[in-house]
Image (spheres, coloured by chain):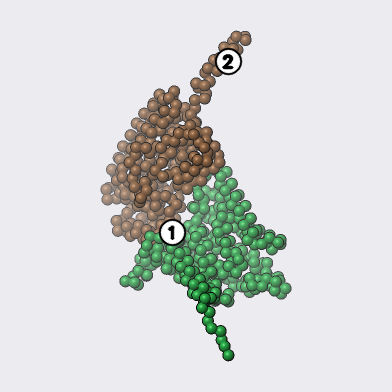
Amino acid sequence: MRARCWLFLCLALTASPLHAAVRLNVVASFSILGDFVRTIGGDNVNLTTLVGPDSDVHVYTPTPSDAKTVADARLLVVNGLGLEGWLPRLLQSSASKAQTVVATAGIAPLKLGSDADPHAWQSVANAKLYVANIRDALISADAADAEAFRGRAAHYLAELDALDAEVRAGIAKIPPERRKVISTHDAFGYFAAAYGVAFIAPLGVSTETEPSARDIAKIIAQVRAEKIPAVFLENISDDRLVGRIAAETGARIGGTLFSDSLTGEKGDAPTYIALVRHNIKALTSALEH
Amino acid sequence: MLADALISPFTDFAFMRRALAAVIALALGGGPIGVFLMLRRMSLVGDAMAHAILPGAAIGFLLSGLNLFAMTTGGLIAGFAVAILSGVVARSTGLKEDASLATFYLTSLALGVTIVSIKGTNVDLLHVLFGNILALDDQTLLLVAINATITLLVLAVIYRPLVIESVDPLFLRTVSRAGAPAHLLFLVLIVVNLVSGFQALGTLLSVGLMILPASIARFWSRDITPMICVAAASAIVSGYVGLVVSFQTRIPSGPAIILVAAALYGVSVLFGRNGGVVRQLFPAPHLEA
């Protein structure tokens, strides 16, 4: 009996460090990155997302529990390109030793004014680079589970390829002269560049800026002159301004586009793939005829 | 050419006409309130109120999501609670109005941040609630107009006790008991004006167009009635010039209007008839026999 106990104890001691303790603590800065990490990391990572669904990553204020989360993390996955302006101070104050992974590494940033446009995930081709970066970071932090990460990433990359084709097929259905819309803030630069739909936005790249009367007048004049068919809203910002532009020009409100944030489980865009599908459906149904 | 620059923005664009109408309504209601605020040394109450409404807005958000009506109603209730509690404390104890207001608004702000964090959302509620003068729909415009009307009517009723109390509270106490109710009614007016102003136009404009014109008027008159007229007039001028400036340059409208008011204030500080710097350096000769 005693011998059996010893045997059991030895087995437990040798087994536990290999299995129970290897779940890697990963922190993602906002919901879309969180979705990528969850998809690739699966059960092998312990994921915390700082800015959750339906929340604005531009104007976020970290809490003490965030500092603790970051301090306990092995990997910190961020978008970079100036999206998480609040992050450097959080890192400093939490004394985190986490390795920071910039998911946009290797993406040629578009310019918006003098700064880089951070909303790179809106092009599915970029999303694939995000996934590759996150996969490589996970593998280098946790080599033991490399196979699992590679397998899930390969599967997901194939899904993203299919998604990219789906988006292109959707856009192809819209007559070229109708491929232009108004949306609340400049979050669709990469989408516009990749798929050839023109986006015009009253707010700047960040939801924090305020438009001048001149900006609004210019947009209204443009909508009238170019006969832009539809105006879109976003899930995280005030839509009164866009509503006003629609009322003044007779453009119709085409629905909601999801830009910087996923929705909750019950919403229309709980994952990145659902988000892109939702947006392309909203665009095609508003612009097709 | 000049007439074009000054008038055509308003004939070409409905949103400019709406903005002008809103600024005029705000000036008529906010001007007199600002004068009384200044005379009672409560000029900073507006900024305090912008924070004090957070718990109400947050509860509105918890109950019905990003619904402006619910959030505004909640904000109004929170504003009333803070204004009236601090008014009652200031009147029944030795604590001065500014100190008791500061206590209550900070408590209210702390409560608001707590409620928002419990819900766990990161949408900046006040950012969403606070409107923009370029994005006025019919409903908001009506709200601003009704507000100005009610404000002027109520002010007409409580004008005498309010004026006497502002200059000689002890005298008022010996001849009438209208002081306390008039003061509380005045506090209610402040809250209604500010909160609906925030919702329609944002903090900067609704507070700024109350306080700056009052400070300007102080340099041009010693009597309250002309002071109120100068305040309302300079608010209207700032609003109009600010909108034109915002239309011709790229300055956002709210800041443009307040900067014009600030320029008027600078001129008044220098050349004002009543205590202006130049007037003090070169006093008019005394009448001599």
| A39, above or below A193, in the image | above
| B225, above or below A241, in the image | below
Which residue is label 2 attached to?
A9
Where on the picture, by quarter, is residue B51? bottom right
Q: Is residue A19 left or right of residue A4?
A: left
The residue sitting at the right extreme is B174
Name the residue type under label 1.
Answer: Ala
Chain letter, disc 1 residue: B
Residue shown at the point (56%, 69%) measured from the top left = B35
Closer to the observer: label 2 or label 1? 2
**Number of marks in the rendered image:** 2
Which residue is label 1 attached to?
B135
Residue shown at the point (41%, 45%) measured from the top left = A82
Name the secondary structure under disc 2: helix
Report whether mark 2 lies on the same chain as mark 1: no
Q: Quadrant of the N terminus of chain B?
A: bottom left
Residue shown at the point (37%, 48%) measured from the top left = A115
Q: Is residue B158 left or right of residue A146?
A: right
Q: Quadrant of the C terminus of chain B?
A: bottom right
| A113, above or below A66, in the image | below
Residue shown at the point (54%, 74%) measured from the top left = B275
Inter-mark Cα distance, 2 to 1: 70 Å
Chain letter, disc 2 residue: A
| B215, above or below A45, in the image | below
Where on the picture, by quarter, is residue A10? top right
Whether residue B232 is visible, yes or no, is: no
Whether residue A78 is visible, yes or no, is: yes
**Dot label at residue B189:** none
Q: Colour of chain A?
A: brown
The answer to whether the residues at label 2 and label 1 have Cβ atoms under 8 Å apart is: no
Name the residue type under label 2.
Answer: Leu
The chain letter of the green chain reads: B
